[in-house]
Image (spheres, rainbow, N blue to C red):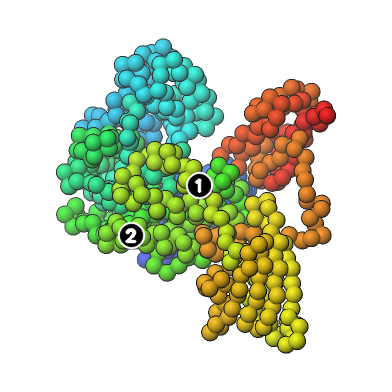
Amino acid sequence: MFDKILIANRGEIACRVMETAQRMGVACVAVYSDADAGAKHVAMADEAVHIGGPAPADSYLKGEVIIAAALETGAQAIHPGYGFLSENPDFVDAVEAAGLTFIGPSASAIRAMGLKDAAKALMHEAGVPVVPGYHGDNQDPELLAGAADTIGYPVLIKAVAGGGGKGMRLVERPQDFAAALDSARGEAKTAFGNDAVLVEKFVSKPRHIEVQVFGDGTHAVHLFERDCSLQRRHQKVIEEAPAPGMTEEMRAAMGQAGVRAAEAIGYKGAGTVEFIVDASEGLRADRFWFMEMNTRLQVEHPVTEAITGVDLVEWQLRVASGESLPARQEELAITGHAFEARLYAEDVPKGFLPATGTLSHLAFPEGCRADSGVRAGDTISPWYDPMISKVIVHGPTRAVALSRLDRALAGTQVGGTVTNLAFLGALTRHAGFAAGDVDTGLIGRDIDALVAAPAPEPRHVAAAAMAVLGLDEDQAEQGFTLWAPLHRAITLGWQGEEIAVDVQVEGRDRQLWQIGADQVVAERRDGRWRIGGRAMPDVSVAGGVATVFDGYGLPFDIIDPLDRDSSAGGDTNVVLAPMPGLVKAVFASAGQSVKEGDRLAILEAMKMEHSLLAARDGVVAEVLAEAGAQVEAGAALVRLEDEEA
């Protein structure tokens, strides 16, 4: 076993690897960028090395700097985590050339699975079922259109070097193919530097089911399946294991296909073979096809660990250090059911816009596993993925596990940024999902109901105001007298609307709150406040916001009456940056006429590009930012001329 390893990653996965490695007695070296100097993974590590600026290209993607850090600190191996350099075969070659061990598959195995078209051809030869489609080298548009006609519409155009839904277009009619092809190629070229595409049959009721495999370079086993069908724009939201409705026949067939795929490329370490499944007639052993293989540990690996009792990171370390497979196939079994929900800092009502902010409060309830790379006091940076945590639960049955997930999400407390908690909670209570009737289109079909913002009750407003005014504390030293009730007033903000709040403190243990037309009584019994007859929820007050931890977190703005006039109104002519980020491109110029909806600029933040559009027809008065500029949230980028009266 290794004495010391370097983890070439950050955030949640770096912390996750350290937990197992340190438990096994292996010292861990962290690497960090300027933005991560005070990060959780740095604090957890036995030692840490600074590797560059906040942009991934200046730090976490600098393979030669990371290898030098490993050599300087005496690390014997490098664990790549996921993302960044984890599936870069050139990095693997460089690691091994430096005399270090790469904790993962060989460079040749990564290359074999790196391009979707070549991987599908390889899998077809290995006897793994593949989706009907065109995966050839000829990229002539007419040939591709002809292939689509042969396959039969609807079809999917997919970037050969794709991932995360980029370079992917659904085409339902022949007349739409050419435009969709141009769009997919353009996006693929920008994202991957490769505009080659493949064309595949689109499955009408698709489920995304993947098989966890593990190999030692010669032999492989599978650790059963995960269902990752609950997706939004091709991004996984909630994963589970095992897949609901799975038959033993299909599980055996998929498991064998996964093992064949791994053994065909001499796979070593943890990997995932992803399949698209046609669930239009239930789960059938002849209705699944290979999509791709992820040659690394997956974000959702904890659900597999929960149902098998296997620590996959421990297996990675043991096999990389020279051991053979830690278990035979017949020794592996499924126990119970597990779910994982991905908790993100994002503004769901604004189209899941990635958010930033300093976490004023972060707490998870007992009974769940929370894999997180941040702590209270940490900042969600615009430079990286805005994941706060993965919330994982396990239960004896799917119904029990889902109920535990619902309860865990309801008990999770995040202050200092908006999150997708309410969205995740709505999914746990979705009737179709609860019944196991899930496919990749579920969220899209019911998106309006799933993103409905929770409405606060008067008791929530009173709780926020009570915490802001300090009236949830003992009033003995706050000016209360027996002959004159204490009167206080405050104004809170909820989604742009002001709420006037008034309170009469009638005693140390009784307060009368007036919230608009509603009156709420707060009483303290046995040392605990009750508002409107219900226990007062926890409240976090920080940064001008009071977050009430009920309804998945209800943030109220604390309005200073001295600032209200200056903040009223706004210049609707100005296009503002909705978050901190990099101005990737500017398409506007002074004097240019624009129409409502025209794209004026692109802002890059949180690993995504966001188009900033004209809110109305008009003429550009001035451009206030140029491509390459780093801007803060609220920065003015483009101003239109005032509308004529």
Q: Residues within 10 Å of mark 2 (few under 14, many from 20)?
A: many
**Numbered disc in front, either 2 or 1:** 1
**Residue at far bottom of view:** 482
- Quarter of the view holding residue 311: bottom left
Residue drawn 56% across the image and 39% down it:
608
Residue drawn 79% across the image and 23% down it:
591
- Quarter of the view holding residue 286: top left
Where is residue 218 shown, x and y percent of the image? Answer: 23, 45
Where is residue 503 shown, x and y percent of the image? Answer: 70, 72
**Helix, strand or loop at disc 1?**
loop
**Residue at far top of view:** 142
Residue 212 falls left or right of residue 427: left
- Amino acid at circle 1: Val
Residue 218 falls left or right of residue 91: left
**Helix, strand or loop at disc 2?**
helix
Vertical side of 605 occupied by 334: above or below: below
In the rendered image, is residue 172 in sight? yes
Residue drawn 35% across the image and 21% down it:
153
Cα distance, mark 2 to mark 1?
A: 23 Å
Which image quadrant: the N terminus? bottom left
Q: Which residue is mark 1?
A: 451
Which image quadrant: the C terminus? top right
- Amino acid at circle 2: Ala
Figure disc tally: 2
Viewer-closest of 90 and 261: 261
Q: Which residue is mark 2?
A: 401
Residue drawn 78% across the image and 51% down it:
567
First reached walking from the N terminus: tag 2 or tag 1: 2
Where is residue 554 shown, x and y percent of the image? Answer: 58, 59
Viewer-closest of 398 and 141: 398
